Image: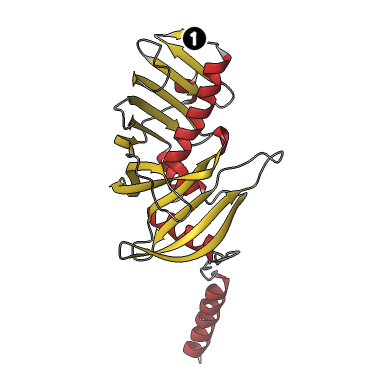
Amino acid sequence: MKFNLLSAIFLSVFFMSCKDKKEPITVQEPLQTFNNKGQELIYNMVEKVGDYKTLLKKKDVVYTYTYQTPDGKTDVSTEKYLFKGELSYGAYHKHERTFPDLKGLIEQGYDGSEYWLKNNGEIITDSIRLKRVAFNRPTNFYWFAMFQKLMDPGVNYEYIGEKTIDNTSYDVVKITFQSIDDKPTDIYQVYINKETLLVDQFLFTVADFGVMEIPNLMKLEYEEIDGMLIPTKRQYKKSTWNADVSEEPWIHVTWSDIKFNNGLIISDFEK
């Protein structure tokens, strides 16, 4: 009897102890929902190349930007971006297209509130030049983070259909943006490779310069850098909305020496 009583007491304490222990809670991520097939295709593409959260974890980037037109005119700049706040800086060591009348080093930046321009260390306040800077800085940043930003709020997606180009099958998605004050916004039409899920090419307009009727076609080549797929080689020229390019030569853009997480801070973007 003594043994049975002690056993009963032990078992009672044991079960009470187990009862007090909390079962591990499994937290399930909410299922991703989509408004349409176009949005789902863009989401899957962004997951493949790396989303904006991935960029934010890398904090910043420094790389060499080279832009060459068919006549041989070239810009070469060292680009620096801080992803939080989308701060941007460019040091143009060669600028045969951008302010070719200026000699020496050109620096331009956006510190989160102001666009600024320097030539050989001297501040330039010319409003016409600053308007060009106000186009260059966000444009260069956007091109680098374009795919990630296609998941931003205010983006509209329309699935156009399937298209085969040079024996490669694509899903085609038209992308537009919510307008502020009814101003024209850019239009993109991306061709997502059905096998790789990557955008091999896309059509785009340049609303800031009124280039809306005749788009450009951009072709891309990717490089894996620090766990992300970055379209480091680009070429573009005039096209039709059916992606039939003109006979004009290509404009070439390359990004090289890409390095993330360089310890940049806000003061690096101030004039």
- 260 displayed left or right of 7: left
Residue at 57% of width from left, 57% of height from top?
A: 157
Residue at 43% of width from left, 51% of height from top?
A: 202
Callout 1: SS: strand
The picture places residue 232, in percent across and down from the top left corner, at 32, 42
The picture places residue 18, in percent across and down from the top left corner, at 52, 75
Residue at 45% of width from left, 13% of height from top?
A: 118
- In the rendered image, the residue lying farthest to the bottom is 1
- 99 displayed left or right of 135: left
Amino acid bearing label 1: Ile
Q: Is residue 271 visible?
A: no
Question: How many marks on residues?
Answer: 1
Q: Is residue 77 visible?
A: yes
Judging by the rendered image, the residue that carries numbered circle 1 is 123
The picture places residue 177, in percent across and down from the top left corner, at 60, 47
- In the rendered image, the residue lying farthest to the right is 181
Q: Which of 179 and 141 lies nearest the eye of the viewer? A: 179
